Image: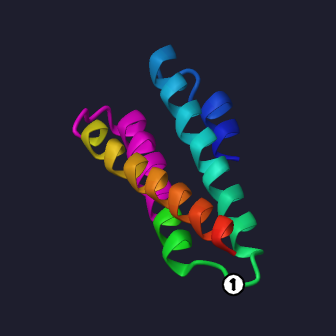
């Protein structure tokens, strides 16, 4: 839904580069949500892993959405923190799945 909003609702107000940024944010949000759903299906889901993935997704995608909507470049400095949380979460969830 967010991707469609960017592609159709914002196409006249964002530059092509900002539309590409919006697309990246929506793609990572999709995979974060999918990962949360899959990881939650585990018989003993890792609360830490789920929390890190959820928070990382919100920070990563949210900062990119805010960057696109406000054109405040400072939001771009927040994005890597969300990406790092996502990486740590995927590694943690993979390790926990491998151990079980």
Q: Is residue 51 above or below residue 68?
A: below
Q: Position of residue 11 (x, y in %)?
A: 59, 23
Q: Is residue 51 above or below residue 70?
A: below
Q: Position of residue 38 (x, y in %)?
A: 75, 64
Disc 1 residue crowd, few under 14, some 14–19, many 20+, Cα 10 Å: few
Q: Is residue 14 visible?
A: yes
Q: Which residue is at a point 32% across and 50% down the rendered structure image? A: 81
**Label 1 SS:** loop
Q: Position of residue 48 (x, y in %)?
A: 49, 76
Q: Residue furthest bottom?
A: 44
Q: Which residue is mark 1?
A: 44
Q: Which residue is at a point 69% across and 84% down the rendered structure image? A: 44
**Residue 71 counted in the magenta span:** yes
Q: Which residue is at a point 72% across and 66% down the rendered structure image? A: 37
Q: Which residue is at a point 45% across and 64% down the rendered structure image? A: 55
Closer to us: 63 or 35 = 35
Closer to us: 47 or 55 = 47
Segment tinted magenta in the rendering? 55-74
Closer to us: 34 or 1 = 34
Q: Residue furthest top?
A: 16
Q: Residue furthest left?
A: 74
């Amino acid at each position: 839904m967010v991707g469609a909003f960017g592609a159709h609702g914002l196409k006249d107000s964002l530059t092509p580069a900002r539309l590409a940024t919006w697309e990246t944010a929506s793609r990572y949000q999709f995979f974060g949500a999918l990962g949360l759903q899959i990881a939650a299906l585990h018989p003993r889901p890792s609360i830490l892993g789920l929390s890190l993935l959820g928070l990382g997704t919100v920070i990563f995608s949210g900062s990119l959405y805010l960057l696109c909507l406000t054109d405040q470049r400072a939001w771009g400095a927040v994005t890597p923190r969300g990406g790092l949380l996502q990486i740590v979460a995927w590694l943690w969830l993979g390790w926990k799945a491998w151990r079980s």
